[in-house]
Image: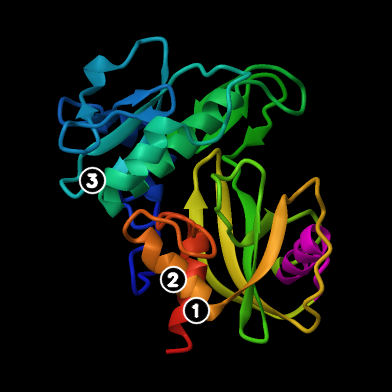
Amino acid sequence: MLITASAPIAFAGSHIDRADHIRGDPDAIAALMTARARLLKLEGLDPVLTPEGRLVWSSLADAAPENELVFLGLDDAQRGCFAEVVPVDPGGSPHAGPASWNAMTVLEPAELAAYGGARALVGWHARHRFCAVCGQPTVIAKGGWQRSCTGCTAEHFPRVDPVTIMSVEHDGKLLLGRQPRFPAGRYSALAGFVEPGETIEEAVARETFEEAGVRVRDVTYIASQPWPFPSSLMIGCHAFADDPAITIDVTELEDARWFTRAEVIDALEATAVGESGRAFWAPPKYAVAHVLLQWWVDRAV
């Protein structure tokens, strides 16, 4: 797990052993379904927390008989950890809600990572009950790390969507943008999904040009973050621009600007105490965009 000067990357560093060697052994998984086994308590896809700000774990007896169980792995005491697949509203938002945002602020890193992995996996199962090949129902396999079609026998695996997110630098300034859905004053690193047939470097260059009209070069990888809303892998990169001229795609961004190092430092320091900087409000600490901004500031020290 990468640890920056300010904090570990959110949703990384789970203490649950994924135990891949057990997933394909139904008998081994069944042997773990004892009174010692732990069931992660969820309300839909939201975490349930104790008054002290910890995840709530219960026993498998609390699971509804009609719901599928996914095997998350083994905890430090070698107990099987499971989560229940519950129906989700097809029209509901896949993005983080109030309960998830709250969890990011109170859960310790390992617990937040455990929740994030479970949420992404459970959410995938809830949305993939039918085969994309023939339309027949699918059933859980390999402890929840696969679904198998009951019709054509196609095998389906949990998907992860790669997203590039990039700090772009020119002449000691950083390019940041804001989307209309952002809180007032919030600016963040530009980001976009990696498309079929392109490299990470190509995605960085394409997205930066599409959103801000800026051409970039010398793309380098900095850090990544699993983002379980619904199931992305944020790939943090850095790039340089030779021309600072900005042409905003208003379907993607509300605004984009170049910020000085002093302005970025001020915004990061303000965010640490829950305030906005003088020039903009920085991304929260649990976002990889914050990590990119902090990395950019730290590397010049």
Residue at (44% x, 71% y) in the render: 266
Side of 75 where 290 appears, left or right: right
What is the number of the mark on residue 15? none
Q: Can residue 72 be seen in this view?
A: no
**Amino acid at pointer 1:** Ala
Which residue in the protein does label 3 denote? 75
Q: Where is residue 66 in the image (x, y as percent from the top left)?
A: 41, 10
Side of 71 where 267 appears, left or right: right
What is the C-alpha distance between the residues marked 2 and 3? 41 Å
Which residues make up the magenta segment? 201-215
Quarter of the image where one finds residue 284: bottom left
Which residue in the protein does label 1 denote? 262
In the displayed structure, 169 sits above or below 24; it is below
* Mark before the other along the chain sequence, 2 or 3: 3
Q: Position of residue 255 (x, y in %)?
A: 71, 55
Instruction: Choose mark 2 or mark 3, whichever is in front.
Output: 2
In the displayed structure, 298 sits above or below 270; it is below
Residue at (73% x, 51% y) in the render: 253
Q: How many marks?
A: 3
Which residue in the protein does label 2 denote? 266
**Amino acid at pointer 2:** Asp
Q: Where is residue 192 in the image (x, y as percent from the top left)?
A: 70, 54
What element does badge 2 sit on? helix
Instruction: Choose mark 1 or mark 3, whichever is in front.
Output: 1
